[in-house]
Image: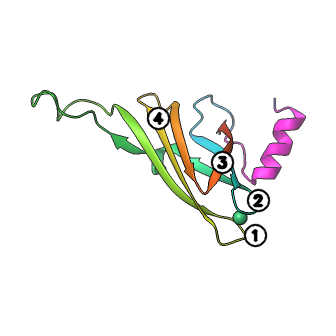
Amino acid sequence: MATFLERLQEIFWGEESAGGNGMAPALRVKVECDQCGEMICTRIEKVYELQEQFAPPEDEENSHSSPASGYLLTKELLGTECPNLICLTMHFDADKELTEHSVEGGKLVEVQDSD
Ligand SMILES: [Zn+2]
């Protein structure tokens, strides 16, 4: 059952809950623009937006069959208040857990799993 806060977040983010199967197929990310301080929210669909990364092939035989060693997301965000383009880069491990990130032109404020 969704809490009041979760319902508020659904409204705020403009997304319907997919029913909460625990798989968290998406992330909700909030960044703050360095130039004007605007909060910019975006939704990242892991299936579509994460690029598979592979470890450098140390062993030729394994390089073709090994699963992704991690995932990379790059995304450009533009607010409505100013022309400052924010470049978001996020690295994920093989389980699609966020491991590190960098933001050019802004700051990462919040990352949450999302249905
Ligand atoms: Zn701005």
State the separation of the CA atoms marked 3 and 1.
Answer: 16 Å
- Residue 51: x and y in percent read 39, 46
- Residue 27: x and y in percent read 61, 42
Which residue shows up at 19% across the image and 31% down it?
A: 65
45 relative to 80 in the view: left or right: left
State the separation of the CA atoms marked 2 and 3.
Answer: 11 Å
Q: Which residue sits furthest front? A: 35
Give me the disc on residue 38.
2
Any magenta on residue 17?
yes
Residue at numbered disc 3 = 107
Which residue shows up at 67% across the image and 37% down it?
A: 112
Q: Quadrant of the N terminus?
A: top right
- Please name the amino acid that badge 3 sits on: Lys
Secondary structure under badge 4? strand
- Residue 12: x and y in percent read 81, 51
Q: Quadrant of residue 104?
A: bottom right
Which residue shows up at 53% across the image and 44% down it?
A: 102
59 relative to 36 in the view: left or right: left
Secondary structure under badge 1? loop
The answer to the question of whether label 2 and label 1 lie on touching residues, with beta carbons closer than 8 A, is: yes
The region drawn magenta spans: 2-18
Secondary structure under badge 3? strand
The answer to the question of whether label 2 and label 3 lie on touching residues, with beta carbons closer than 8 A, is: no
Give me the disc on residue 81.
1
Of the image marks 2 and 3, the number of the one nearer the N terminus: 2
Q: Quadrant of the C terminus?
A: top right
Of the image marks 4 and 3, the number of the one nearer the N terminus: 4
Of the image marks 2 and 1, the number of the one nearer the N terminus: 2
